[in-house]
Each structure stands twice: as C-alpha cells, then as structure tokens.
Amino acid sequence: MRVSVLGQKRSIASVERPSIYTMDELLDTKHEFSLLKRAKSFAHAGRGILVLFKTTPNVWIHTVALVVVVALGFYFHITTTEWMVLVFVCGFVLVSEAFNTAIEIDMNLTSPEQHPYARDTKDVAAGAVLISAITALIIGALIFIQYVV
C-alpha cells in the first residue's frame, strides 16, 4: 500500500511513525539541572531573534512602531495599566511575526516547490500577523485618543 507524504507516494514501510511515550517517560526528571544547558537554550533563543530580524523586513516596521508607541507613552505619561496593555500588544505583534517567520522557514524547507497547501499555510500565518497588528493599532488608538483630543 502506498501513501502520500508531502505530495510524494511512498510505501507505508518507508513512512516514519512518531514515537509514542508514556506519561512516566514524559515526566522523567532523572536529568540534572544544568546552568550550561540553560545558557545554551538562551543562546539558541537569541540566535532565533537574530534570524527574525535578519530575514524579516516587516519586523523592522513593527519595531519602529513600537519605539514610536513607547515615546508617545512617555510623552503623554500614560498610566501603568495602559503601559501593561501596550507592552502586551506590542509583544503580541512581535510574537506573531516570529511565528510567521518560523512557519515560512519551515514551509520553504519542507515544500520548496510551489504547493497550494504551503501557500495556504503561509497566507494564514501572514493573516495572523495582520490581525495582531490591527488589534494593536485599535488598542493604541483607544489608549492615545484621550491624550490627543
């Protein structure tokens, strides 16, 4: 019997099956805590942020908007609650952009040829960024309109 994997026909024997773990195996805490491993983990995350900024022009637009919003926040002396909401929505946009970039990198790797599902996946991820940016814009307008008018 043959199955389709990423558009390629393969025999069932050649399809890799995911490993099944028991809950005890997932919760295994035999491994010692290691500061070195935690530091490496942070280094990988930092590299991911660098990849995001090097490969995604739109993240620079979001960053400029973030700097403008922070400057306006200081200028208008917004409340602590307003700061918390702004920090959250700015992070929401940047995280959306990071996930979008990760999905695009993955789609480019797993589907280098044009494929409608890859296109749909990328479009949905980009749509999520747009939704988060519009949400941030609306929240920013609701916060700052009272100081401008």
Image: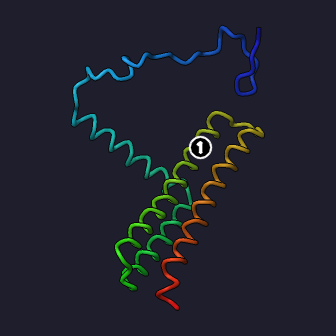
Horizontal side of residue 70 vs 138, given as left or right: left
Q: Is residue 141 left or right of residue 26?
A: right
Q: Which residue lies at the image location 22% right of the left edge and 32% below the top edge? A: 34
Specify whether 51 is left or right of 112: left
> Vertical placement of 53 versus 61: above or below?
above
- Quarter in which the N terminus is drawn: top right
The residue identified by callout 1 is 103
Mark 1 falls on what kind of element?
helix
**Residue type, numbered disc 1:** Ile
| Above or below 42: residue 140 | below
Instruction: Give how far across and how far down residue 103 sits, in percent.
Output: 59, 43
Q: Nearer the viewer, residue 14 or 55?
A: 14
Q: Residue at x 59, y 39 (%)?
A: 106
The image quarter containing residue 87 is: bottom left
Picture layout, residue 9 above or below residue 7:
above
Image coords of residue 37 (percent x, y): 27, 34
Q: Quadrant of residue 17?
A: top right
Mark 1, Cα crowd under 10 Å, few <14 / some 14-19 / many 20+, is: some
Most foreground residue, 51 or 88:
88
| Display coloring | rainbow
Looking at the rendered structure, the number of numbered marks drawn on it comes to 1
Direction from residue 74 to residue 135 in the image, left or right: right
Tell me residue 88's x, y (percent).
44, 62
Q: Which residue is at 43% across, 81% downward?
A: 72
Q: Position of residue 78 (x, y in %)?
A: 38, 80
Question: Observer-nearest residue: 136 or 105?
Answer: 136
